[in-house]
Amino acid sequence: MSNIETAFKSPSERERLIEALIAIVGEDFVLSSEDMRQKHSMDTLPENKICSLAIYPSSTSEVQAILKVARDFRCPVWPFSRGNNWGYGTKNALHENAIILILERMNRIIEVNEKLAYAVVEPGVSQKQLNDYLKKNKLKLWMDCTDSTPNGSVLGNSVERGYGYTPYGDHFAHLCGLEVVLPNGDILKTGGEHSNAKTWNTFKWGSGPFIDGLFSQSNLGIVVKAGVWLMPEPEDFQLFSFEINDSKNLPAAIDALRELSLDGIIQCHTHMVNSFQMMSLLDSYPYEKRGDNHYLSETTLSEIRSQFHLPEWSLIGGLYGSKKIAKIRKKSLKNKLGPLGTLEFFDENKINFVRRFAKFYENSSRNQLLFFLASLVKSVISPKPIKLIKLLPEIFDILKGIPNESILASAYFKSKTPPPAQELNPAQDGCGIMWLAPTLPALGSEAETILNIVKPIYQKHSFEFSGCFTLINPRTFFLLLGIFFDPSSNDEKKRAITLYQDLLFNLKEAGFYQYRLGLPSMENFLSHSPEHANFLLNLKASLDPENILAPGRYAKLTKELSK
Ligand SMILES: Cc1cc2nc3c(=O)[nH]c(=O)nc-3n(C[C@H](O)[C@H](O)[C@H](O)COP(=O)(O)OP(=O)(O)OC[C@H]3O[C@@H](n4cnc5c(N)ncnc54)[C@H](O)[C@@H]3O)c2cc1C
């Protein structure tokens, strides 16, 4: 068993380890000073674990050599592609003193096949890099991106089973063919394992047991290369927005989205946020309005809603395909969603008008007359705040796979300093945000049930409820629960943790399990499923007998902690 808690009690042992690692990647790529240890352990969660060092390999053979050294020194290694997993644990390990392995220097786009619509990438390839590559080379392919950072890793997000918005938004489902370094240093190619297979990146199943899933949300291997399916550029793309002003219509809307999705009318992953989560996109948290309370009262929230003209729930989705099909789809959407709220469509022309107008409005503030005119036009277009109007073209781009930082800025909601103009990094900038993402069957009645569970728990711990229903397949949503907290307040940090644990416990009891875990959820992972837990333990014991690779990740079980 690895030295999980006690790694490097002796300074000389640590020095020897650092020397051995420097011999592999060079001095510049082993960051072990106190400053660097702190920097690499910063997180948006209320608690973090200080690592021993961070290492940046540039090749698969270096990854293999690092694992060998880790085994020799019995020191745990935690792999990250680019390490931007904010809200779930960033690039923290579960225990102090781990080696943090960051693969961002392995950033080659190895191949893009336009006809078969896929790319083969290394873990360091960022969303921005892949999108820029497609655009620069005028390839008629779109990628799917998250609404997190453009610097996020295409592969890292996919192995963690992250989501975007387009029909290709289930990222793990669109990986095809993985190359993995196993804890013992062996290299494994999934998908049939024939080194000359022509369909490595086009046919997922290969032959024999399908094992790709073992390397997703796991601690059984380090993925160093993968095929990613891309979307052929559609003839037509339109964004649709849908607003529910009366919460009573929410269950019916959830049912309508299921039906539209099962019928193939909706093919994308719609996101529907509540008004509080929407506020986080518009302004900083109004601390001055909460008086002596820890949170904003219902009256204050409803005043803010009216001030910003915010509906109870706001949904965004995209229509992809031919113009003919778009017409049919729009009609179905109008029939099903129209009676439940306000539905609007935006094509490229309309969005360009919005984009130009938002720019004009902002620039006009320097000239009184222009500003008067701009305000007049704005009052005709929309009563909504200009920030919200400006957001729409940014979301339009995200739905086309063009990443930007517009949604990421919401992570700074409770931060006392505003987000920088660019290169946002909520962990380094000291923001407080945690996510929980329980899944639910796509039924209005289940949406009601889950809301009835979580809303009182938020209230009990004096936080405002923040939620987003994301359609992840025609039969399932997840409800992304945001816990925004003031990182400078110990009281809020403590309450954020108890809120998280309370939500986790009650959701599990009611049968709502998460699509992806944050570090604070690992502790009791599979507590309701001992057979599953044992199966994983046995696999881990056979593939990683020294328990070197990310011990406890998606597997925190007492057995593996015993020495
Ligand atoms: C405001 C905001 C919005 C967000 N929006 C989204 C969103 O739309 N969709 C979404 O999915 N997430 C979202 N996130 C969460 C997160 O920022 C993204 O998932 C981000 O892509 C993760 O960082 P990364 O891409 O650098 O991956 P990494 O942090 O490198 O990887 C994620 C995890 O996968 C594992 N891993 C990574 N690479 C490998 C590998 N090569 N081999 C084995 N294991 C590996 C690591 O253990 C790591 O913890 C959001 C967060 C915030 C704060």
Image (tube, rainbow, N blue to C red):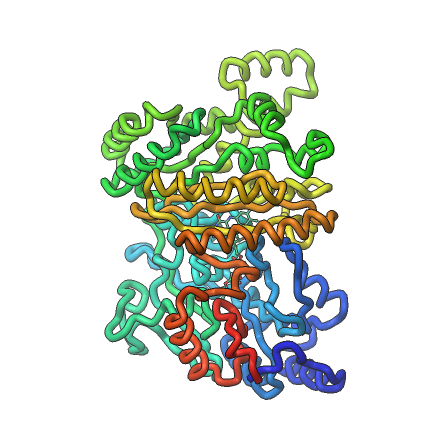
Q: How many labels were placed on the picture? A: 0
Residue sitting at x 61%, y 41% = 463
Q: In which quarter of the image is the N terminus?
A: bottom right
User: Percent position (x, y) of residue 103?
Assistant: 55, 67
Residue sitting at x 37%, y 44% = 471
Image height of 420 relative to 174, above or below: above
Image height of 144 relative to 354, above or below: below
Left or right: where 161 falls relative to 176? right
User: Percent position (x, y) of residue 224?
Assistant: 46, 70
Could you tell me if residue 150 is visible in this image? Answer: no
Could you tell me if residue 193 is visible in this image? Answer: yes
User: Percent position (x, y) of residue 431?
Assistant: 66, 48
Residue sitting at x 39%, y 37% = 317
Left or right: where 516 falls relative to 429? left
Left or right: where 561 falls relative to 516? right
Q: Identify the image quadrant of residue 388.
A: top right
Judged from this view, the residue extending furthest toward the bottom is: 72
Q: In which quarter of the image is the C terminus?
A: bottom right
Q: Identify the image quadrant of residue 462.
A: top right
